Amino acid sequence: MMTKFGSVLIQLVSVDSTNNYVANLIENESCQDGSVIMADYQTQGRGQRGNSWQSVSAENLMCSIAFQPDYPLQEQIRLSWYSALMWQQCLRRFGVHALIKWPNDLYVDGKKIGGLLIEQQLKGARLEWVVLGCGINVNHNPGLAMSTSILDETGQRFQPTTVLTEFLDLMNAQQALLIGNFQDLKTMFEAELWLKGEWRQFATKEGRVFEGAILGVSDIGEVRIQTSKGIQHFGNQEVLYLLNN
């Protein structure tokens, strides 16, 4: 049976983290598959690499979605790829053309407009819950280096709930892609990767700088980079983009 994303919508004025709120619901066995938690403000919002994600209250979209997957643990990357693609399509509905910066940020002409954080809960060897955290700059640009918003890109203001409604519509309408052929989903994700095929500088987590071109991703979500020494694979937080080059 397919999940109904948005089957339950809880809107909060303020919370430490919407992902934490969902995790507490799951722990208390009071979470329904497809539930969405939305907050006007997060005091401890999290992004990739432990970065914080904060916003002017009610100006941007901050939400988390609870999902009980029906696919094997070895394909746990599915939701990451699928949700990034759905956000890309959602932004296009608002006139914004974004690409996916591996692993799951959204960039417009080199500027970040949003990002995803996925946290998983296992029960033995089974993937029991996935919590998808989303942060999208709707009406406020946080002023960080290389950031943007829907307002910046279009000159129009939108209610964050309007943006969320469009995203959930896409998440529900295209679930056949989420649970269908794994390689088809992977191919679609790879086609939308930012800087794919462009030779750039990268740095490993140990600080080694090298040049390479993104080719795509592996079946477990690692980025595949062509280098002078051959194709190398890197997991999340194992490689950094050096963008000022």
Image (cartoon, rainbow, N blue to C red):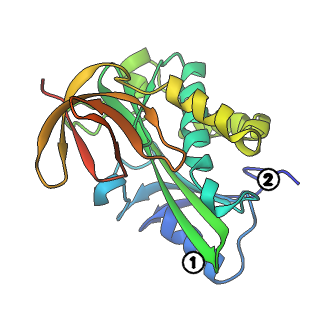
Which residue is situated farthest in the bottom direction here? Answer: 28
Viewer-side residue, 89 vs 180? 180
Q: Check the image and name the residue furthest to the front.
A: 229
Residue 14 lies, in percent from the top left, at 46, 63
Q: Image quadrant of residue 169?
A: top right
- The residue lying at 29 percent from left, 23 percent from top is 110
Name the one closer to the observer, 234 or 174.
234
Position of residue 7 measured from the top left corner of the image (x, y, whole percent): 78, 54
Determine whether, in the image, residue 196 is placed left or right of residue 159. left
* Number of numbered discs: 2
In the image, which is nearer the foreground, mark 2 or mark 1? 2
Q: Quadrant of the N terminus?
A: bottom right
Please identify the quarter of the rendering in which residue 155 is found.
top left
Mark linked to residue 199: none
Tag 2 secondary structure: loop
Q: Look at 80% across and 51% down and name the residue there.
A: 4
Quadrant of the image occupied by residue 90: top right
How far separated are the C-alphas under marks 2 and 1?
A: 20 Å
Give the image location of residue 222, x and y in percent. 42, 46
Residue to which mark 2 is pinned: 3
Q: Residues within 10 Å of mark 2 (few under 14, many from 20)?
A: some
